[in-house]
Amino acid sequence: MAYAITRNCCNDASCVSVCPVNCIHPTPDEPEFGTTDMLYIDPVACIDCGACADACPVDAIFPVDRLRGPDTAFGPINRDWFRDHPSDHAWGAPSFPRSLPGGAGDAGPLRVAIVGTGPSAGYTAQELLRSTGAEITMIDRLPVTGGLLRHGVAPDHQSTKRIAESFANVFHDPRLRMHLNVEVGTDVTHEELAAHHHAVVYAVGAAADRRLDIPGEDLPGSLPATTFVRWYNAEPTVPAGAVRLDAERVAVIGTGNVAVDIARILLTDPDRLAGTDIADHALAALRGGRVREVVLLARRGPEQAAWTRAEFLALRELPGVELVVEDHPRVRAVIESAAPGSRAALLAGLPFVPYGADAEPAAGRRIVLRFLSAPVELVAGADGRVAGVTVERTAPADGVGDGRGEGAGEGTGDGRGEAAPGDGPVGPVAGTGERETLAAGLVVRSIGHRGVPVPGLPFDEAAATVAHEGGRVVDPATGRPLPGAYVVGWAKRGPSGGIGANRACARETVDALLDDAGARALSTPAGSRRDFEKLVRTRRPDAVGLRELRAVERAERARGEAEGRPRVKLATVPELLAAGRRR
């Protein structure tokens, strides 16, 4: 029986490299790889060897005859992809890993600093350790590693978090030194990093949220999606009281995977979440909260929804939660005429319901999908907090949909592929002048992430990324590379692609670094590795190293074992530092 890839696919293509018959597509060498929701196995070519399942870092691959419940849909999904993307599974030209066995032109080994410890940083370190004799320094502003894996992946997606196990081996490599609770730009500068390393790679992600730029956006009770996601994932910079769940209705603006994650977490039975690594304060808030209805607002139509197919199928199967579509003539027509396999077709069979300003929250738990509704203002109640969102009906400005995808570019926060570009043709939408205010006691803005400037590096304001060419940081005025400075991940390509997309991204950046090292284009560091460690200890006596990180890991897992959970996260910096000292 053939194998199939399911909803947890992380797109890192570990399965592609081990398949003996090249039946998994798109491969990293194919143009669809950068935009696909997931990878697919051709059931005709599959020889049922199971090598892909063994290699999958997130346990997303199973024999088709073992799929159960909602996952049974992935057998046909894998098969049908090859109907639209025929492949002869012929092997391309062989490629071999890069290597740089020696140093960088001086007596010592290549020394590389990596700023960040998330997936893009992990893949970068992995590539360097596999192909060179480099010594690596990893730096993170938080006292724990993981980045997106720890603080972005939804707690009910524990299988996705398993990819962290492959990075744990990297972090324990004797050639790697770790300095956590150290912020570049505050505790140490880029110039100081460059003075102690041949190269510095920035893997700092896209930390800010895109804004709506509408009145009332900054009212209490109006939150960016990153705050909400970090809150339920125990990110130590977000306090336990950052989110209040005392309203019956929550409006989530956007239809990307992050918006879907938020809606799902808000309405999932807390008893089901109690077996995950969700933050204790979030679990308590959900247990005592009043939320019964979540409205997903999209200014475009269903054909441009940005969720991935796998995420939406999971939403349809959420136990005890009704999923409905606000009845609108154009929305209904699009769904009823949708081509098989399109995003709009995923909504076929869902109930249509009238839904406007006078709608009361449902008696049970419900998710309402309201398309063609652009938020134009958030309104305050008597207490000064958000009490509603005013929306304006939209229509295609030139007779077609936008095609960019509601929430496109937000990334997923969960590693299962980027916010989808949608199925409709490209074109703007415009307001019709028809407005109404929907009551909502909490509004979460999930319309995308945005990179922030990195101290000491040039920033491309238009792209909201570090200015670069193929991973080499460049001076925008001249286009010339800044010697020894590199970028990877969302800080490099913008907030697109999930966890696995960082693997190919890291390989490109490491290749550029190795090309420069081989060409003797990297400057010899003036300070030694020991000099840098002394500098860090002077600036941040409470910096966290590998031993302290191991102590935190043991503490969290011990707490989790006592409660039947994978771990119970320590949610504040003082708690994390205290656990690290108990080594």
Image (cartoon, helix red, strand yellow):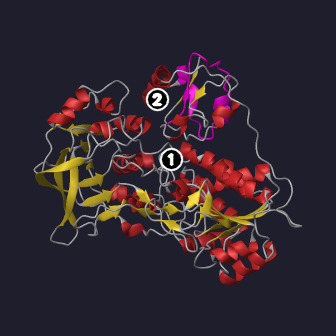
SS class, disc 2:
helix
Q: Given the current orientation, which residue lies at the most extreme right position?
A: 107
Q: Quadrant of the image for the C terminus?
A: bottom right
Residue 277 inside the magenta-drawn segment? no
Mark 2 burial class by Cα count in 10 Å: few <14, some 14-19, many 20+: some
Q: Which mark is residue 497?
A: 1
**Where residue 252 sits: x, y (%)?**
30, 53
Q: x, y percentage for residue 180?
A: 64, 69
Q: Nearer the viewer, residue 199 or 278?
A: 199
Look at the image and give the residue range highlighted in magenta: 38-66
Residue type of the residue flagged with mark 2: Asp
Residue furthest to the front? 478
Q: Which residue is mark 2?
A: 71
Q: How far apart are the alpha carbons under marks 2 and 1?
A: 23 Å
Residue 168 visible? The answer is no
Residue 221 is situated, as x and y percent measured from the top left of the image, at: 28, 65
Q: Is residue 301 left or right of residue 475?
A: left
Neighbour tally class for label 1: few under 14, some 14-19, many 20 plus, Cα within 10 Å:
many
Q: Is residue 194 above or below residue 124?
A: below
On whether residue 60 falls in the magenta region, the answer is yes
Q: Which mark is residue 554?
A: none
Residue 130 higher or lower than 445, as above or below: above
Q: Is residue 241 left or right of residue 361?
A: right
Quadrant of res 398: top left
Give amino acid for label 1: Gly
Q: Is residue 561 above or below residue 88?
A: below
Residue 33 image point, x, y percent: 54, 37
Name the one closer to the observer, 289 or 396: 396
Can I make out residue 509 in this image? yes
Between label 2 and label 1, give the one nearer the viewer: 1
Work out whether mark 2 precedes mark 1 in sequence or the reverse, and give the earlier one: 2
